Amino acid sequence: MASRLPSQQELQQLLNLGISRAHATKGLQTQNFSVSQAIDWCLKNPESIDVSDNLVQSLRAIGFSEAHARHALLLNGNSLERAIDWCQTNPEQKSSDGDAEGKKGAANDGHGDNAARVTSSSSSPFSRFVFSLLFSLFHLRD
């Protein structure tokens, strides 16, 4: 891995594509500061996202279940605002006995109450589309 830090110009190109600063820095360093190779690396090595328990509690405080809150945060990269929007536009489905399916299925979906990591590849189809479109446009410039 390279010993220098990436320049702001190098970083900004990856940040503009929605790649986090830490992931962009790692991609640039592992790819000898080649922006296009760093983008490829970031796409092939999606970053892990830790779900913030504080954000889960914030969503629970406004009425969402823990399972629904965790799922929304995982899909939206720990963005509280986007997670709230997602929860509001994707309400939990109620089963016949009135329990939310997310609550019943949480233990069986591989995440449970301790869901801590997911890759950014599980983001919404729209954000994946935008990211791939920007990636394609970036490569057309080269």
Image (spheres, grey):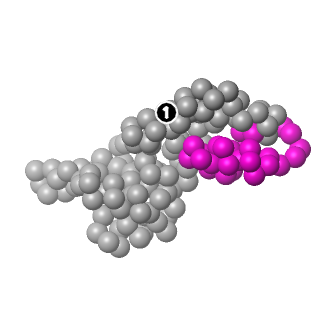
Q: Find residue 4 and report its horizontal and vertical position in percent.
A: 87, 46
34 or 116, which lies in front? 34
Query: Which of the image's four quarters has the N terminus?
Result: top right
Residue 12 vs residue 80: left or right? right
Residue 76 vs residue 25: left or right? left
Residue 1 vs residue 66: left or right? right
Q: Quadrant of residue 45?
A: top right
The structure residue drawn at horizontal position 82% and vertical position 34%, both measured from the top left corner, is: 32
Q: Residue furthest bottom?
A: 61
Q: Disc 1 designates what residue?
A: 133
Specify whether residue 8 is painted magenta.
yes
Q: Answer yes or no: is residue 23 visible.
A: no
Q: Find residue 69 and report its horizontal and vertical position in percent.
A: 37, 59
Q: Residues within 10 Å of mark 1 (few under 14, many from 20)?
A: few
Query: Which of the image's four quarters has the C terminus?
Result: top right
Kind of residue at badge 1: Leu
The structure residue drawn at horizontal position 30% and vertical position 64%, both measured from the top left corner, is: 64
Disc 1 on helix, strand or loop? helix
Tell me the magenta residue range.
1-28
Q: Find residue 6 and report its horizontal and vertical position in percent.
A: 79, 47
The structure residue drawn at horizontal position 44% and vertical position 51%, both measured from the top left corner, is: 76
Q: Find residue 52 and report its horizontal and vertical position in percent.
A: 52, 61
In the displayed structure, 37 sits above or below 56; it is above
Specify whether residue 129 is painted magenta.
no
65 or 9, which lies in front? 9
The structure residue drawn at horizontal position 72% and vertical position 36%, both measured from the top left corner, is: 35
Q: Quadrant of residue 88?
A: bottom left
Q: Residue furthest left?
A: 96
Residue 48 vs residue 8: left or right? left
